[in-house]
Image (spheres, helix red, strand yellow):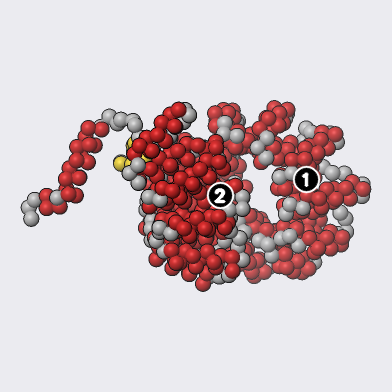
Amino acid sequence: MHSILFQITSKIRSLARSGYITHARKLFDEMTKRDAVAWNSMLTGYSHLGLHQEALSLFRQMRTSNTKPDHFTFTTTLNACGASSSLRNGTKIHALVIVLGCQSSIPVNNSLIDMYGKCLCPFSANKVFQEMIDSNEVSWGSLLFAYTNSGQFDAAASVFKSMPKKVDVAWNIMISGLGQYGEIELCLEMFKEMRESFCEPDQWTYSALISACTESLELVYGCMMHAVVIKTGWSSAMEANNSILSFYAKLGSLNDAVKVFESMGTLTQVSWNAIIDVFMKAGDTSEAFLSFQRMPDKNVVSWTSMVTGYARNGYGEEALDFFVGMIRNCLLPDDFTFGAVLHACSSLAILGHGRMVHGCVIRHGFHAHVYIGNGLVNMYAKCGDLEGSNLAFNDIYEKDLVSFNSMLFAFGLHGKGTQALQLYEDMVASGIKPDEVTFIGLFLTCSHSGLIDKGLEFFESMRLVHGLSFNMDHVACMVDMLGRGGYLAEAKELAIKHSKTGDVKTSSCEPLLGACSTHGEVETGTNVGETLKDLEPHKETSYYVLRSNLYCASGRWKEAEMVRKEMVDEGLKKIPGCSWIEVGNKVTAFVAGQSQPCMEELYTTLHFLELEMRHPCFIDCEN
């Protein structure tokens, strides 16, 4: 019996390490008897793949069984708590560690310090450290990380100074922590001190330094560190090369990234994922796809990079196809995967696909995650399902500012001004401070709902009450709101008052010109149109179209025709309008000027609809 248990446990461990976690879990569930080693193997499998919520859920199941957790159980589960920033679960497990008498274990204590550090609780991390009878280099390093991760660099410096021995890891933690907060100058100073103390930097040191350059987006520093890596002979080190590749990827330097990638002797999953990201950011989806195909081993990050890249470049269908392919390959998506595919569903506005993804979100237990919940709110709003948005919003366990902003835009997008304003009041009452995006949502809501006075009130409170500055988007929204309401003089005055830069002038002129068209203000509209043309001569098409609409709205057909003729003479062409409808999970697009196979049938249907609208008595012939 013990031999069979050992064999099954080994198989579970092997499947989990290979990424086939679903198969591993199926084998685990079929076990008639499990010991602590079997539970730990499954927990470790989840933790290594970044499936921390699944690990915590499995730990809860273990607690309801008759299996007692051991030191390995606690270290693995605490790692899941730290990685998912689940302080509540972490403190509960800490209490259990004390109850079961495991607080004397150095690995468990180190895991506790690390967990508190990742959850930004350096005080608790220090308390665990102070209560330890014995400590080692890992204990000191974990405490040092706890302070650097929370940005408490004075306390970190004190711990660093008190360390019995400043090993390479300690220097790397300090450099990495400073880099995380964009302190590139302090990173370089720390690097200089490290070399002066006769402590030799390793590939992790250079990786941390280049990552710091990546965070600060400083191309010069990054290139300088790249040169140092080559000069010191670390150019063949895998971690250093991956960091250099990620640096060029983040800054969008395609040619430099490709050169580094092609010069690398050993390619890891990180290397392949980075080059995929480079190509996707450059908009070269074909090369990204070829790189994906060439990868010997693909993980969740690889698939997610493809889904994200396709969605970012406007290839929503391809993003959905890759998401489905990922599920079929038995890889569990993470929160980043779901965020990317929800973005694709939002851009396509296909409700059926969005609901399918929502089902996967619920099945994998991500529906309460704030990041995923925000994506669901946005997706349902853009697919025209306000009720779905509201339900997704209510499902979010701990709502943040983005949650409220997303729901605010959903209400505003659907013309629900009253609900939007009530939501704003609820947000403020809950202690969440509005930001610039919040006020754009409020202005758009007031504009589309005709709440002029309320919009002006928010505009004033933005600066006076909340201390936020106006940008071109806020001014454009206010100009649009006043223009829609017929307050053209006030709209023009506001545009002039806040037009300090060309960008603000342009963003204000376009809605103002549109409002002039709506209200037939030809003289004002013509002047605004000339201003717009002078500001952005490369966008002449929009200028001509808006001016033509202005003349059409006022019945000046001859002038409108002359404007259209000017467009033809200039070789300009208006981008045709496009709309689409989803029927039976199939999307049909309608582009102005293009015919459809069923056009005759559509015109017949429209004719009958028009007849019914004009003669309501024909709708129900029986009555």
Q: Residue at x 80, y 64 (%)?
A: 155
In the picture of the structure, the residue carrying the numbered disc 2 is 505
Q: Quadrant of residue 348?
A: top left
Tell me if residue 618 comes above or below residue 585 in the rendering.
below
In the picture of the structure, the residue carrying the numbered disc 1 is 209
SS label for mark 2 = helix
Q: In the image, which is nearer the foreground, mark 1 or mark 2? A: 2
Q: Residue at x 70, y 40 (%)?
A: 247
Looking at the picture, tell me which residue is in the foreground, 301 or 185.
Answer: 185
SS label for mark 1 = helix
Instruction: Tell me residue 115's x, y (percent).
Output: 67, 60
Looking at the picture, tell me which residue is in the foreground, 510 or 490.
Answer: 490
Amino acid type indicated by mark 1: Leu
Q: Residue at x 84, y 44 (%)?
A: 201
Give the distance between the C-alpha atoms of the residues marked 1 and 2, in whole angstroms. Answer: 42 Å
Residue 351 appears in the figure? yes
